[in-house]
C-alpha cells in the first residue's frame, strides 16, 4: 500500500491531499474496513437463544406439508432392491447425456462449483456528476446506480459478481458512457467504446 | 403410491428439468427486453442471427448479451445487428479452434483472445491442461502476450505458476510482476524467463523490498 494512503487511513492527512487514483483506492479501503468493523463481534447474535427455542417448538407443531418436505429433505436410510438402484443409475446417465446435448462442455460444472458470487466494490471519482450507474455483463447490461453518500465526489457500489472475467462501463448522468480509468485491463466492445475488465478470483481453492 | 425407486426417478427428472426451464426463461426475458427497445424487424433479424449461430454450437446467451449491451449503450439498430453478427462470427471461429466442448464463458474468452492474436495452439493447451480455470489463466496469458512475451512462453509461465500452487489473486499478480521487471530494464522475453525461474525455485515473484506499482 502507498505511504500516502496509509497516512490518510491513519487520519494523518486529509483525503483531498491524495491523487485521484489514491482517492478511489482510499474509498475502497474505507468500505472494506467498515465491513471488517461491522463483522467484528464473536459473540452470539442477540436473540439467538430465543430463535433456537422457537424453531424447536415449530418442529413439534409442523404442518403436514412441512413434515412431507422434511421427509424428502432429511437424510434417512433407504432400502432399495438392486434393480431399482440400477434403474436410478441409468436415469442419471440418460439425464447427463441429455443435458450435454443442450449445453456442451464440462466447464459449466466447474463454474457451478465455483459459482458463488463475491461482492465487488466499484468506485468512480466523478465530483461533477449528478448520477452515476454501472452496467456490465454481470448486470445483464442493466444500469445499477452508484451512491455518494458523503458527497466527496467518489461514487461507489458493491455488487455480487460470479468468479470469472467480466466487462463493464460507467454511465454518468444517464448519457455519458465512461470507461473505468482505474481498471487494469480493457476490451473493445464492438460499439466504439472500451469496456473495463474485472477479473474476480474465487475466494479459496481454484483459480 | 410411488415406491422408493419411483420417487428417486421423479426427483431426478425434476432436477434435470430445472436448468432447461431457467435457460428458456432467461432467453424469454432477453427477447422481451429487445422487443421493448428495438423495432420488430430488427428483433427478427437479431433472432435469426442468434438461431443460426446456435445451430453451429454458439451459446445464445453470449449473443443476447452483446445485443443488450448495444441497447443499453443507446446504439443504432444497424450497429447492434452488425456487432452481434461480428460476435457470432468470432464465436464460430473460437468453436472451430477449440472444439465444441468449451463452456459458455470460456468460449467468450477464447473468442476475445483469438481477436487479440493469441495462438490457437496455446489456447488449446490451456483448455486441455487447466479446463476448470481457463478464463482466469487466459486473461493472464493475454496480459503477458500484450506485454510482448511470446504466447508459448506466456503459457509456460502460467503453467509453472499453477504447478507451484498459485491460485486466484496470486495468479492475477503475475502480469504486475512482469511489468515490474520490464520497468527494471529487462526485455519481455528475459523478464518472462526470470519469472518462470523464480516460480520454479519457489522464490517470490516480486523480490522483497520492491513496491509493486501496477
Image (cartoon, rainbow, N blue to C red):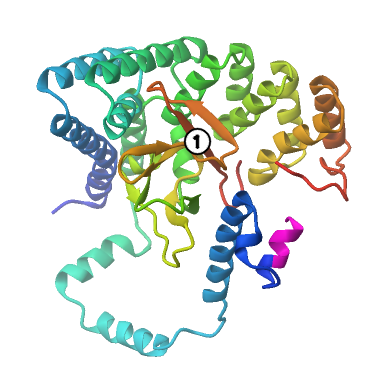
Pick whichever, B135 or B24, lies toward us: B135
A206 horizontally vs A77: left or right: right
- Asked whether A80 falls inside the magenta stretch, the response is no
Q: Position of residue B134 (x, y in %)?
A: 57, 30
Say which quadrant the N terminus of chain A sits in: bottom right
Q: Is residue B128 shown above or below A95? A: above
Q: Secondary structure at mark 1?
A: strand
Residue ID at (20%, 19%): B47
Query: Main structural element of the magenta stretch: helix, strand or loop?
Result: helix
Which stretch is magenta? A1-7
Residue carrying label 1 = A196
Pick whichever, B99 or A72, lies toward us: B99
Residue ID at (37%, 13%): B86
Residue ID at (16%, 75%): A63
Q: Position of residue B27 (x, y in %)?
A: 23, 32
Tally of numbered tags: 1
Q: Position of residue B191 (x, y in %)?
A: 83, 27
Say which quadrant the C terminus of chain A sits in: top right
Residue ID at (21%, 70%): A66
Q: Is residue A15 shown above or below B114? A: below
Extreme residue in the left direction? B40
A26 horizontally vs B154: left or right: left
Q: Position of residue A174 (x, y in %)?
A: 30, 43
**Dividing the picture into quarters, in which one does residue B21 lie?**
top left
Pick whichever, A129 or A144, lies toward us: A129
A87 horizontally vs A150: left or right: left
Label 1 crowd bin: few (<14), some (14–19), many (20+), radius 10 Å: many
Q: Chain of mark 1?
A: A
- Asked whether A2 falls inside the magenta stretch, the response is yes
Amino acid at each position: 500500500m502507498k505511504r500516502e494512503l496509509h497516512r490518510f487511513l491513519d487520519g494523518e492527512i486529509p483525503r483531498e491531499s491524495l491523487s485521484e487514483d489514491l482517492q478511489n483506492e482510499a474509498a475502497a479501503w474505507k468500505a472494506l474496513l467498515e465491513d471488517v468493523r461491522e463483522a467484528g463481534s464473536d459473540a452470539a447474535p442477540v436473540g439467538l437463544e430465543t430463535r433456537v427455542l422457537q424453531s424447536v417448538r415449530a418442529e413439534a407443531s409442523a404442518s403436514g406439508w412441512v413434515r412431507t418436505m422434511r421427509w424428502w429433505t432429511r437424510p434417512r436410510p433407504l432400502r432399495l432392491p438392486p434393480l431399482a438402484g440400477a434403474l436410478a443409475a441409468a436415469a442419471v446417465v440418460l439425464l447427463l447425456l441429455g443435458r450435454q446435448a443442450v449445453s456442451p462442455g464440462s466447464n459449466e460444472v466447474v463454474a457451478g462449483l465455483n459459482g458463488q458470487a463475491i461482492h465487488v466494490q466499484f468506485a468512480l471519482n466523478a465530483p461533477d456528476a449528478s448520477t452515476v450507474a454501472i452496467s456490465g455483463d454481470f448486470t445483464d447490461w442493466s444500469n445499477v446506480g452508484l451512491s455518494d453518500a458523503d458527497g466527496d465526489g467518489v461514487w461507489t457500489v458493491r455488487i455480487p459478481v460470479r468468479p470469472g472475467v467480466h466487462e463493464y462501463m460507467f454511465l454518468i448522468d444517464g448519457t455519458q458512457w465512461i470507461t473505468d480509468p482505474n481498471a487494469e485491463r480493457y476490451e473493445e466492445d464492438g460499439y466504439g467504446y472500451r469496456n473495463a475488465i474485472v477479473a474476480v478470483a474465487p475466494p479459496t481453492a481454484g483459480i | 403410491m410411488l415406491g422408493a425407486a419411483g420417487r428417486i426417478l421423479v426427483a431426478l427428472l425434476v432436477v434435470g428439468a430445472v436448468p432447461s426451464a431457467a435457460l428458456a426463461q432467461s432467453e424469454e426475458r432477453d427477447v422481451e427486453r429487445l422487443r421493448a427497445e428495438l423495432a420488430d424487424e430488427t428483433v427478427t433479424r437479431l433472432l435469426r442471427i442468434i438461431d443460426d449461430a446456435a445451430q453451429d454450437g454458439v451459446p445464445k446467451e453470449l449473443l443476447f448479451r452483446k445485443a443488450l449491451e448495444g441497447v443499453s449503450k443507446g446504439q443504432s439498430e444497424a450497429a447492434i445487428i452488425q456487432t452481434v453478427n461480428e460476435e457470432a462470427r468470432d464465436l464460430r471461429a473460437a468453436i472451430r479452434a477449440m472444439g465444441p466442448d468449451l463452456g459458455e464463458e470460456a468460449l467468450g474468452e477464447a473468442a476475445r483472445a483469438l481477436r487479440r492474436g493469441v495462438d490457437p495452439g496455446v489456447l488449446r493447451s490451456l483448455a486441455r491442461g487447466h479446463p476448470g480455470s481457463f478464463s482466469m489463466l487466459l486473461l493472464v496469458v493475454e496480459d503477458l502476450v500484450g506485454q510482448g512475451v511470446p504466447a508459448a512462453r506466456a503459457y509456460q509461465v502460467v503453467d509453472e505458476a499453477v504447478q507451484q500452487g498459485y491460485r486466484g489473486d496470486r495468479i492475477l499478480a503475475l502480469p504486475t510482476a512482469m511489468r515490474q521487471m520490464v520497468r527494471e530494464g529487462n526485455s519481455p522475453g528475459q523478464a518472462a524467463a526470470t519469472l518462470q525461474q523464480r516460480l520454479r525455485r519457489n522464490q517470490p515473484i516480486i523480490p522483497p523490498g520492491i513496491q509493486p506499482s501496477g
